[in-house]
Amino acid sequence: MEEILKIYENKIGISLRWVNSKSFLTQVIFRDTGFHLTEDEIEIFLEKIIDSKIQKRCSECQLGENCRSILLQTPSNKVSLAVSSIELGQIEDLLRGTLFQLRLNNYLTEICKN
């Protein structure tokens, strides 16, 4: 098995890159689903999360924040996910943490070149 470079991890998932891969894609895995995303696609995914936060929720739902009634669009226009508001927050944290770490790593790589 190839070695991985863990980028970010939280309660819902993990983001990583394969060490020996020539691809610049980041694999983001949560809830049995994996996405291979560019930095731009991670930003798009974050925008979709913001859009999902304004969706109306069932007022009578007994599951409350655990109800998977939020439809989260993904960077692929052919894939959307049903998530709860708790999961939505965790996915947002996973993507924001991943993006932050990727940008920090890129910045440090550029600085170390000099």
Image (spheres, rainbow, N blue to C red):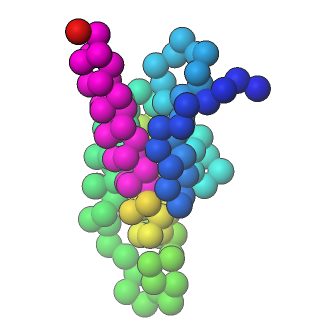
Judging depth in this view, the residue of 17 and 107 nearest the camera is: 107
Judging depth in this view, the residue of 7 and 59 nearest the camera is: 7
Main SS class of the magenta portion in the image: helix
- Residue 56 vertical placement versus 99 (above, below): below
x and y percent of residue 100 in the render? 31, 40
Image quadrant where one finds the N terminus: top right
- Residue 2 vertical placement versus 100 (above, below): above
x and y percent of residue 2 in the render? 70, 23
Give residue 53's quadrant in the image. bottom left
Residue at 47% of width from left, 64% of height from top? Answer: 87
Residue at 60% of width from left, 55% of height from top? Answer: 31
Q: Is residue 20 visible?
A: yes
- Magenta span contains residue 93: yes
Q: Which residues are magenta?
A: 91-113
- Magenta span contains residue 77: no
Residue at 39% of width from left, 63% of height from top? Answer: 89
Image quadrant where one finds the C terminus: top left
Judging depth in this view, the residue of 39 and 67 nearest the camera is: 39
- Residue 41 vertical placement versus 52 (above, below): above
Q: Is residue 79 visible?
A: no
x and y percent of residue 26 in the render? 49, 30
Residue at 54% of width from left, 58% of height from top? Answer: 12
